[in-house]
Amino acid sequence: MEQTLNGIQTGSVYALVALGYSMVYGIILLLNFAHGDIIMVGAYTAWFLMANLGQSPIIAVVAAVIVCTLLGITIEKVAYTPLRKAPRLSLLITAIGVSFLLQNLAQLIFGAGAKPVPPIVQIKSLTLGSVSVSGNAILTIVVSVISMLLLTILIKKSKMGKAMRAVSEDTEAAQLMGISLNKTISFTFAVGSALAGIGSVLYCAAYPQASPTMGGMLGLKAFVAAVLGGIGSVPGAVIGGFAIGLAEAWASALGLSVWKDAVVFAILILVLVIKPTGLLGRNLQEKV
């Protein structure tokens, strides 16, 4: 039971990051592999404000989300907008290049060693019978669920959310109806990066350290979660995130903690072989 709760905690972070992958792919068919490194920037922001400037955790959390949001918009404007009409392979290579750029900049500025992040929240553990649940796990799950509900309301009810769905369905028709493609794409990157900022804070609450490469593996696992749920599907990203988190936790419970990363990528291979569209993905037919 404790491992299951740990899996739900980790899966909550994966789900938040996977949502960013799915939303961006649903709009412009881009696998934004720099998304995981935005989490790294958020972690360093929180560490710098609390450890070096002595700011309160609340200010650090808000600043981390804002910095991640602005960084996501900047990456979209500088790196992706000029290549919007280029082949998708060019966008993919650019995304990988931005990822390496962020990692090496962080290593150049902060050094290669991990930085200990001061405690963001301190909540007492909750004991249910023989099972002890950490306060950080409860907070992570609650914040993640609230964030996902707010995102669902935003997409379903708001004017910009309807624009996002319209662009995802048919870009040219959406533009003919007066929807601004640039504003919609920038808003999508902003929302996805804000979720990554929230994920970075929750991840640091569970694993209190920041390193230049921390976003690499985290981003890859979130990508696997997005593929498992169905890339481009918001509910699928949530389901995939929790599924990957639980798979890791149960692998550790069975004594396979050394192989938990291999389990995640084995799931990716199985999904691509058996059901490439994922659990909630849809088949896209293109007429030639």
Image (cartoon, grey):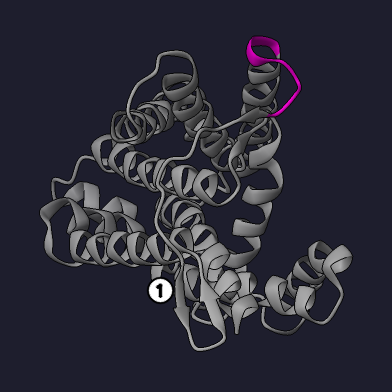
Q: Residue at x 11, y 54 (%)?
A: 159
Residue 273 at x, y = what percent? 78, 79
Q: Amino acid at mark 1?
A: Pro
**Left or right relative to 26: residue 245:** right
Q: Residue at x 70, y 29 (%)?
A: 114
Residue 266 at x, y = what percent? 81, 72
Looking at the rendering, which quadrant does residue 116 occupy?
Answer: top right
Which quarter of the figure is the N terminus placed in?
bottom right
Q: Residue furthest top?
A: 109
Q: What range is drawn magenta here?
A: 108-114
Q: Does residue 166 lie above or below 99 as drawn?
A: below
Residue receiving disc 1: 235
Q: Does residue 93 lie above or below 178 as drawn?
A: above
**Left or right relative to 185: residue 129:** right
Number of callouts in the render? Answer: 1
Q: Residue at x 60, y 47 (%)?
A: 207
Is 11 covered by the magenta stretch? no
Helix, strand or loop at label 1? It is helix
**Left or right relative to 278: residue 260:** right
Is 109 covered by the magenta stretch? yes
